[in-house]
Image: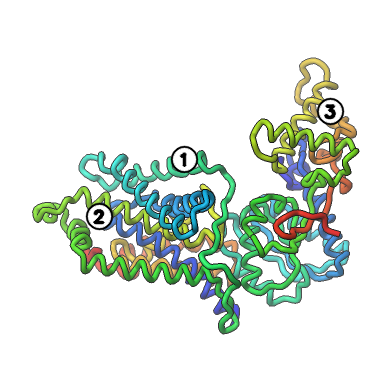
């Protein structure tokens, strides 16, 4: 359920990944930054697994899109203040800031930025697809753009699609069972079980780990919360950029960014 | 230089929080000779309870006062249940019990409030104040004001009130204090309650800036402890000085070296002080206590 690239890149061949991996979301967000007309970005990330992994992908992909990284700042998970890093960013000629973190420091970064008068547009990834982020950052999150799955707002799929049916059915059942709307992590767990069940159905009686892995690798077109999964021996994440969407925070709510 | 001033401001802001937590350590140390490692969790409870009370609809000032009072009560109950029964008041056993107590408090918070972070509204809304090329958040001004007020009030209480003098007497010579009719055990309970209240105030004051969660206690506890050691255990002025100095060191390290080392600063300071000057910067060799 982790979004880092190394999860499937470097780990055991028996590992599969259900969230939208950094290799997918990073270029998607970078393309959005480029489309907005920016060429110089500052990157702020945390030194935890998700942030560190994201920065590696960002550094690989940015030059290919013609984006120059003019600042590369990091903070530690648990930091209560990102003022030092933002002060350094303010001193560069960055035109936009890319935030890559999954923790509550994201909200702190936005608030610090507003207080310091860092007037640049901020972008982010799935780590900011949480209500706690918008709540915590409050007015400072206004205009924040991030890329994550379409299923964050299920209506994005269009009311008559199989994806919408799966996601809204999941949301309804989750809310009935637990009394609150599911967040994306619940969705990723749901996908994990759905994919396992699908693979087990094809793997025959009492498969061992290798047989199960082989069955999973043959998964094709299984629709879950994350999108449509198609695994292969080289791809243990199974999702594509068609499963992503770009959002903007406006008035504390997520709307589709134009 | 703008950046330098900004780093100083951030350092003094965090330093004030460390000062409040360090005061808590010092007060309990003065009363019992032991370190209360649950002090960080009192910091956490202040913020979490404040967020909880605010979410039930209480206006922020009431929620804040309720959170401080509740945490002070928890501190007192903790002392009564976990510390007082320790026969002989052996500091080493008290330390071990407070470590366990810290874990219990953290898990209870996780159980009751869940793992997600909670926001707290700033005490006054509004953009930060710009001065001399740097920005000061309004909440930072609150933190400074509250810390300064707390230190003044504590100083007054300790010097001028009977209660304060009783606490000082207990920490100087416990048996002599009992001879003159001071209830030493009640003073210990009171010191825990007071330390909890101070930690809670720190937690409340910083929560609007950083949001709070069940696990913020451990990190701040270590830093507050390092600050108390840096200044010199047992001396409230030293605790505040240690807190501010540590905050500044951290902020300047993050600004001019590498933010990655920020958390390491407190630990390095702790080690250096313990090796080189264990009584701390302001600690004398005598036992001038609270």
Q: Nearer the viewer, mark 2 or mark 3?
A: 2
Q: In the drawing, does residue A159 fall left or right of residue B156?
A: right
- Tell me which chain the residue with mark 3 is part of: A
Q: Are marks 1 and 2 on the same chain?
A: yes
Which residue was labeled with disc 2?
Answer: B31
- What colour scheme governs how the chains and residues are painted in the rendered image of this protein? rainbow
| Label 3: few (<14), some (14–19) or many (≥20) C-alpha neighbours in 10 Å | some
Residue B108 - label? 1
Q: In the drawing, does residue B2 fall left or right of residue B160?
A: right
Instruction: Give the Cα separation between the discs numbered 1 and 2.
Output: 27 Å
Q: Position of residue B265 (x, y in %)?
A: 49, 63
Residue A101 - label? none
| Label 2: few (<14), some (14–19) or many (≥20) C-alpha neighbours in 10 Å | many
- At 55% across and 79% down in the image, what residue appears? B5
| Disc 2 to disc 3: CB gap under 8 Å | no
Q: Position of residue B187 (x, y in %)?
A: 23, 53
- Tell me which chain the residue with mark 1 is part of: B
Check the image and report above or below for A186 versus B195. above
Q: Secondary structure at mark 1?
A: helix
- Between residues B153 and B287, which one lies in front from this camera angle? B153
Q: In the drawing, does residue A158 fall left or right of residue B276?
A: right
Instruction: Give the Cα separation between the discs numbered 3 and 1.
Output: 43 Å
- At 76% across and 54% down in the image, what residue appears? A254
Q: Position of residue A227 (x, y in %)?
A: 84, 40
| Disc 3 to disc 1: CB gap under 8 Å | no
Which residue was labeled with disc 3?
Answer: A214
Q: Secondary structure at mark 3?
A: helix
Quadrant of the rendering where the N terminus of chain B is positioned: bottom right
Q: Secondary structure at mark 2?
A: helix
- Tell me which chain the residue with mark 2 is part of: B
- Between residues B164 and B122, which one lies in front from this camera angle? B122
Residue furthest top as drawn: A205
């Amino acid at each position: 359920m982790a979004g880092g690239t190394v999860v499937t890149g470097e780990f055991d061949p028996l590992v599969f990944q259900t969230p939208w991996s950094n290799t997918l979301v990073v270029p998607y967000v970078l393309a959005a930054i480029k489309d907005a007309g920016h060429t110089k970005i500052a990157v702020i990330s945390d030194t935890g697994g998700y942030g560190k992994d994201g920065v590696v992908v960002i550094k690989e992909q940015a030059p290919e899109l013609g984006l120059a990284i003019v600042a590369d700042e990091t903070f530690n998970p648990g930091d209560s203040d990102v003022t030092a890093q933002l002060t350094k960013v303010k001193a560069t000629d960055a035109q936009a800031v890319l935030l890559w973190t999954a923790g509550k420091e994201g909200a702190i970064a936005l608030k610090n930025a507003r207080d310091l008068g860092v007037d640049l547009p901020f972008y982010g990834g799935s780590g900011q697809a949480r209500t706690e982020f918008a709540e915590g950052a409050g007015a400072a999150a206004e205009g924040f753009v991030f890329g994550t799955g379409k299923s964050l707002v299920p209506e994005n799929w269009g009311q008559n699609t199989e994806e919408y049916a799966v996601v809204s059915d999941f949301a309804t059942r989750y809310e009935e069972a637990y009394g609150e709307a599911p967040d994306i992590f619940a969705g990723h767990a749901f996908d994990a079980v759905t994919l396992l069940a699908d693979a087990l159905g094809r793997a025959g009686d009492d498969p061992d780990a290798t047989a199960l892995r082989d069955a999973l690798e043959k998964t094709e077109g299984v629709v879950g919360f994350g999108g449509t999964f198609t695994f292969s021996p080289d791809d243990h994440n199974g999702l594509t950029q068609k499963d992503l969407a770009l959002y903007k925070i406006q008035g504390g709510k997520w709307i589709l960014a134009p | 230089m703008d950046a330098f001033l900004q780093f100083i401001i951030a350092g003094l802001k965090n330093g004030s929080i460390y000062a409040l937590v360090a005061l808590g350590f010092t007060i309990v140390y003065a009363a019992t000779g032991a370190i209360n490692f649950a002090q960080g969790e009192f910091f956490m409870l202040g913020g979490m309870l404040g967020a909880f009370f605010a979410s039930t609809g209480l206006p922020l000032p009431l929620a804040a006062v309720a959170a401080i009072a509740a945490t002070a009560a928890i501190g007192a109950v903790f002392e009564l249940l976990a510390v007082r029964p320790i026969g002989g008041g052996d500091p080493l056993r008290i330390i071990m019990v407070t470590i366990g107590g810290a874990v219990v408090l953290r898990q209870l918070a996780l159980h009751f409030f869940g793992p997600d972070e909670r926001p707290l509204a700033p005490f006054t809304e509004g953009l930060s104040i710009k001065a001399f090329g740097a920005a000061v958040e309004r909440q930072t001004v609150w933190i400074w004001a509250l810390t300064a007020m707390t230190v003044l009030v504590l100083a007054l209480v300790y010097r001028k009130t009977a209660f304060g003098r009783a606490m000082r007497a207990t920490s100087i010579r416990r048996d002599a204090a009992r001879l003159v009719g001071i209830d030493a055990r009640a003073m210990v309970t009171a010191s825990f309650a007071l330390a909890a209240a101070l930690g809670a105030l720190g937690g409340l004051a910083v929560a609007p800036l950083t949001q709070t969660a069940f696990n913020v206690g451990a990190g701040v506890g270590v830093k507050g402890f390092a600050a108390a050691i840096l200044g010199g255990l047992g001396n409230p002025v030293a605790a505040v000085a240690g807190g501010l100095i540590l905050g500044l060191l951290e902020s300047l390290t993050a600004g001019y070296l590498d933010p990655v080392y920020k958390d390491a600063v407190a630990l390095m300071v702790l080690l250096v002080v313990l090796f080189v000057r264990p009584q701390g910067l302001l600690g004398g060799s005598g036992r001038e206590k609270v």
